[in-house]
Amino acid sequence: MAEGRAAAAELRRDVTVWGSYMWGFADVGADTFVALGLVFAFSEGAAPLAFLLAGTVYILVGLAYTELASAYPVAGGGQYFALRGLGDFWSLVAGSALVLDYTLCTALFAYFATTYFSHFVPELAEATLALGPFEHVRIGLALATLALIAFLTWLNVRGMRQASLLNEVIGVLIILVETLIIAMGLIFAWRPELLLTQWRDTFANFHLRQFLYGASLAIISFVGLESISQAAQETRRPATIVPRTSIALVFTVFLFAVSLSVLTLGTVRWEVFLDERNVGRSVAIVAGHLPWIGRVAEDVTAALAVLVLMLSSNSGVMSVSRVAFSMSRYDSISSWFEHVHPRYRTPARTIVVFSGIAALQVALASLTESAIDTLANMYAFGATLGYTLVMVSLIRLRFIDPYTPRPYRMPLNIVIRRQGKVIYVPVLGIIGLVGITTVLVIVLFTHEIAAVAGPSWVFLCFLYYAWYRRRRGLPIFRSVSRPWEQEQMETLEAAEEYDLLEQYRIALAERDRWRKRFDHEAGIILE
Amino acid sequence: MKRASFWNEPRDLRRQSLSLWDVVQIVYAVLFLILGTIIIFRMLHLGGSLLGFGVGGGFVALSIFRLRFVLRYLLLRRREKHSHVGR
């Protein structure tokens, strides 16, 4: 046990607020490059409103992640929160949604890296092939994406991890380029009359279903909050670092997404994004409208996007192994996935299996009318399902585990006292739950592919889970009893959060004292 | 232990000078103020619209909100400068 704790402590590093912020931003910051054109293609001139609505829900989910990641600083993220709050079965559901999202993250971002690359090699996007009933398979993009996934798999199996310095450099570059595009664009290229015309035209002929579809796709510009948990797992004193980092991250990404959509609406006709080739390089197209430096800005943005999207795709490969490890540790999937390669010391099996699934997703999506739309469709399903369960877990954990100290607590709470416990009922958490559940319902009603393929994936994962648990003699729908209090203390100790550890011990002692008194009084009454 | 604030503002301004992180926040807040003002003025020229005021006003409001801590910091520094206690 002591060795395990020491190993856990060794994983933790002195990550600064800035380093931790950049870690998240290198992951989440790339989402706008993917979502912008897609949302415009469906929500038309109402795209900023779509970003605003999705962004508001995302802020609430982001604050929930901040609270949970600083209270439970472990890498499992949503899967672990669902395990603590809702039990083994729902943890499997959340885990399967996250695994789906990470594989899709690898697939979608690799696909977009190649579409942005096609800015320099247009032949890549133009190469199509007829494969039986599938008439317009974009074979160039599909093969390039598959090659990129194979390359990333090889890199990860060999154990070449992204250095945090690289994350910081890339994060700074994205921030600078996006700031430059937004500032220069709004000052010199933005035409308010174009914005108003497009806005009014859209609402004069408003298609609610299409708008809702776009709004639910806008949620993908905010996916990647799991990186908060991963940063929390590897940071010393996460209670100090994580809240500042993640709140800044949540608001920056929101501001960039909304600002960029407002800029786009006043700079480019939304119809430009009806062409899939333009959807795949949307931010570069907006940058191309900047005065004086437009041509250079377009090329620089496209080149940066390729790099950023490759890193994001790579983060999908890395992150899925963390979730798989957590699922395996808590008996959701076989320990086969925990195997470490004897030579490279990497979770090679997990990397190969889930990268294979990502490659399969690219191959299947390429057979559909729009590979980008299909992948994004599914991505939105996985994210909203996972986030919904995280919001439910947040609320439930406030009731069943009020003892764990929360260095950050979502604002706006109703304080109630129950059985000697002080419980903070999260009003914003409940609003966030309603919001994210609404988005999930919209996804299920408007995304034709995700409505079938998403639940089918979760069901397949459940079948595997049921088979595995039965074979191990574990309950399928009930939870296995675990020493959570002991584990929480070990986690806080490994994180060097001694103040929190002390607070936790005091809270548990008070609870025990209260229980003893209650039992004693109940005994007297019975006598 | 201090709980982090909702808006992620530095809590104890007396103990610390502005960090690089704070400077970045100030620069961004000023930038938002400029952009927000430009958006509002350009929208006013077109006769105004709710969307324009919403976006521009949002930028300005956020910027002012974020710049509150700079004002607090400057006031504190000024008070310290004029104070003779402890000299």
Image (spheres, coloured by chain):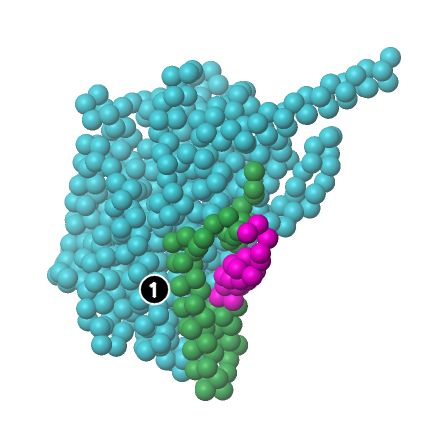
Chain colours: A cyan, B green
B77 drawn magenta: yes
Q: Amino acid at mark 1?
A: Thr
Q: Position of residue A9 (x, y in %)?
A: 39, 26
Of A17 and B47, the residue lying toward us: A17
Q: Is residue A107 visible?
A: no
Q: Is residue A458 left or right of residue A127?
A: right
Image spot of residue A277 (x, y percent): 24, 63
Q: Given the current orientation, which residue lies at the most extreme front position?
A: B87
Residue under label 1, please give it. Answer: A179
Quadrant (top left/top right/bottom left/bottom right) for the N terminus of chain A: top left
| Front residue (pair A311, A175) | A175
Is A344 placed above or below A360 here? above
Above or below: residue A278 compared with residue A385: below
Asked if residue A20 lies left or right of residue A486, the reply is: left
Residue at 55 percent of width and 52 percent of height:
B87
User: Is A32 or A507 nearer to us in this picture?
Assistant: A507
Most prominent secondary structure in the magenta stretch?
A: helix
Q: Is residue A36 left or right of residue A356?
A: right
In which quadrant of the rendered view does residue B20 lie?
bottom left
Q: What residue do we see at 81% from left, 15% from top?
A: A523
Does residue B21 appear in this view? yes
Q: Position of residue B22 (x, y in %)?
A: 43, 56
Give the magenta-colored segment's residue range.
B63-87
